[in-house]
Amino acid sequence: MTPHFSGPPPSFNPRLRLLALQSGIVAAFVVLALRLWSMQVVHHEDYVKQAENNRERKIPIVAPRGNILDRYGNVLVDSRPTFSLMVNREDIQDEAETLRILAEEFGVAPEYARQQLRSPAARTRPVEVKSNITDADRAKVSVLDYEHPEFLVELRPQRKYPHGELACHILGYVTEVSEAQLKRPEFDYCRPGDKVGQAGLERFYNRILMGRDGYRRIIVDRRGRFVREIEMVPPIAGQDIVTTLDLDLQRVAEERLKALKLNGTIAVMDPRNGEMLALASMPGYDPNLFAAGISRADYARYANDKHKPLRNRAIQDIYPPGSTWKIIMAVAGMRAGVLKPTDRLLCGGGINVGGRHVRCMGSHGTPPLSTAIAKSCDGWFYRLGIKLSLDNLRTYASELGAGEYTGIDLPNEFKGYIPSLELKAATVRRTMPNATPAQYRWTDADSVYASIGQAMVRPTPLQMLRSVAGIAMRGEFYTPHFLLEARPTQERPGVTFRNQVKQIELPDDYWDAVIEGMWGAVNAGGTASGSALRDPETGFEMCGKTGTAQVVSKLKASKLEERDHSWFVGFGPREKPEIAAISLVEHGGFGAKASAPNVRAVFEVWLRKKKGLPVQVGAAEAPEPVRPAARPTPRPQPTAR
C-alpha cells in the first residue's frame, strides 16, 4: 500500500516561525549584553573590590584610647596591649562548626559568639570574640589555621582600670558601640565594632579619648591565609586627659562610705574654680568587667541589684535635703527682699498650720538669722517660708542652682525639682484620686514643709554642693567639672575646660550672716559641733550645715530603709574658702552622726596634703554602721534637721 502524506496545515507559516526564532535569539543576546554592561560598567567597582578581596585585605589596627590621669599625674585609666581572638566571617565555611569550636576549645558562649558574627562590624572586619587570651588559646589558633583560617589572633588595646572600683562613677566604662547608638548623631564619627565610652568621663569625652585607627593591607590566598603584608599605616592614640581628681581624697571618701555599710555619696570641690576633687557614690562596680566583655550574668547582677550600683547618686538621684535647705531659704529670702540679716523671727516651738501643730526640735526664742542656722531652728524657717511665698521660692532657689543642671562634665545628670503648682497638682493626682479643688492649691502648710527641705523639694546632692559653695564664695557660682586638660597630639590641639561663672549680688553683711551661721553650726555649739575641725597653723576653720531628711513618718518607720537620710555640707576656711564638700548617707539618721564626720575626714586629709604631711588613707576610724532601730513610740511629727 502506498503511504499517503498530507500537506502542511493551512495555518502553517514557516516564515513566521523563523522570525520568532530569530527574535528569541536576538532577545537572548540583548539580555546577555545588558548583563555584561551592568557587570562591566554599572557595577564594575563592586566586582573589582570583590575580586581584590580574594587576594588583598585591609585589616584595621585599633588605636588605643587616651589615658585618664588625676591632677598629680597618677594613672586612673590606660590601654594595655593584649592578645584577642578574632573571627573573620568571610572565611567561615561552616558557621555551626565555627561556633562549636569557639564554645568547646575557647570557652566562648555560643550566644555571644553568634551575636558577634552577625553584628554590623562583622560585615567589614574581623570581630573580637574573646579578649586577653592565653598562650594556650594562641597555640590552638595555630593548630586550626589550615582548616579554619577564620580564626585570627590580634594584638589589641584593652581598657584597664588599675584601681578597680575606685572612682568608677567618675571614670565610667567602655563597651562596643551598639546599633542603636550608631543611628544617633552624637556617634556619627564611630564605626561598627568601635569601643566607646558608655558612662562617666569615658562617655562625656569619648571623641577626645578615641584615637584614629590604622590598618594593614595584606595578601591572602584563596583560603584566606596570610601571604604577605604590602602596607601598614600605624594608628594614632587618643588624647590623654588630666582630671581635677585628687586620688587621696577620692580614696578617703569611698572608704568612709564603705565603712558605714550604707549607700550614699560624697562630693568634694574647689569653690574657687569648680574643680571637682572627689566624687564617691556607693555602691560601685568594676569597670574592668565591661572593658573585657562583660558576661550576661555579671551585667544582670549589676542591672538587677536593688541598690543600683551603676547609678551616680551625686548627679542622678534626688533626695529631700532636710535642713541643709535652710541655707538656700535664707539667701532666697534676702534676695526676695522679705528678710534682712538682722531680722529676728519667732521660733515658738513650732507653728500651727493647716489644723495641726508642726513642731521645732527646740525652743529658741526670737533668734537672728545666724543663730537660726547654727541651731537649725525649724520654727524660724517655718515663718520665713510663709513670708517668702511659692513664686519667690521658685525664682531664687533656681537662681542658686536648686532644681537646675549644674553643667558638670558627666553624662545623664538629672535636673531634680523644687516646689511648683504643677508639681503639687501631679502629686495630688497620684496620691489623692478624689481630691477637691481646694487640695490642689498651694497652702501655708506646703510652705512650712518646703522651708525645711521636705515635701516637694528634691535637688541632687551636687546641686546642693554647688549652691552652698557659691554662697560660701559670697555669690560666685562656678560650674563643677573634672577636665583639667586634654593633652595635645600631633593631630589635635590641647583642650581645657571653659568655666562659666555666675554672679549673685548681695551686700556683704547679708553673706556674713549666712556664713556666720554655718560657722556657728560647727564651732559655736551648733548641730555639727562634734565634728569641728580647726587648724591654727593654717587658720582653717570648718563651716557647714547638717540635715536630717525624713523618708517616711517617724510614726511608721521601723526598717533600715525607712530611716532618715543623713546630710552635711561644709566648706573651709571661713573667710576665703578653698574646699567644699557634701555627704549624703541614705538612711544614715542624724546628719551630725553619719555625714558630718565624713566631710571632716576629707578635710583632714586635704589639710595634711596642704601642709606637706604624709597621708594615710583608711587610718581614720569610721562611724559605727547604722542598724535598724526598734519601732518608736508615737510622738508628735518631728521635722528635718
Image: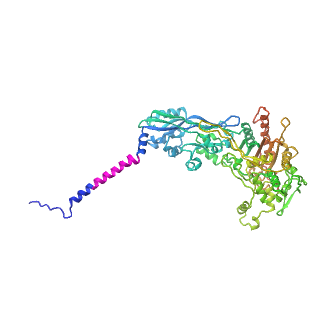
Q: Position of residue 207 (x, y in %)?
A: 61, 43
- Quick check: is 142 in the magenta stretch? no
Write the start and end of the magenta stretch as one range.
Answer: 23-43
| Residue, far right | 365
Q: Position of residue 398 (x, y in %)?
A: 75, 54
- Up the image or down, 490 lies above or below 434; here it is above
Q: Position of residue 168 (x, y in %)?
A: 67, 42
- Residue in front for this viewpoint, 230 or 455: 230
- Quick check: is 40 in the magenta stretch? yes
- Up the image or down, 233 lies above or below 2; here it is above
Q: Could you tell me which quadrant the N terminus lies in?
A: bottom left
- Up the image or down, 171 lies above or below 433; here it is above
| Residue, far left | 1
Going by the image, does 88 lie left or right of 345?
left
Q: Position of residue 503 (x, y in %)?
A: 77, 49
Going by the image, does 45 lie left or right of 569?
left
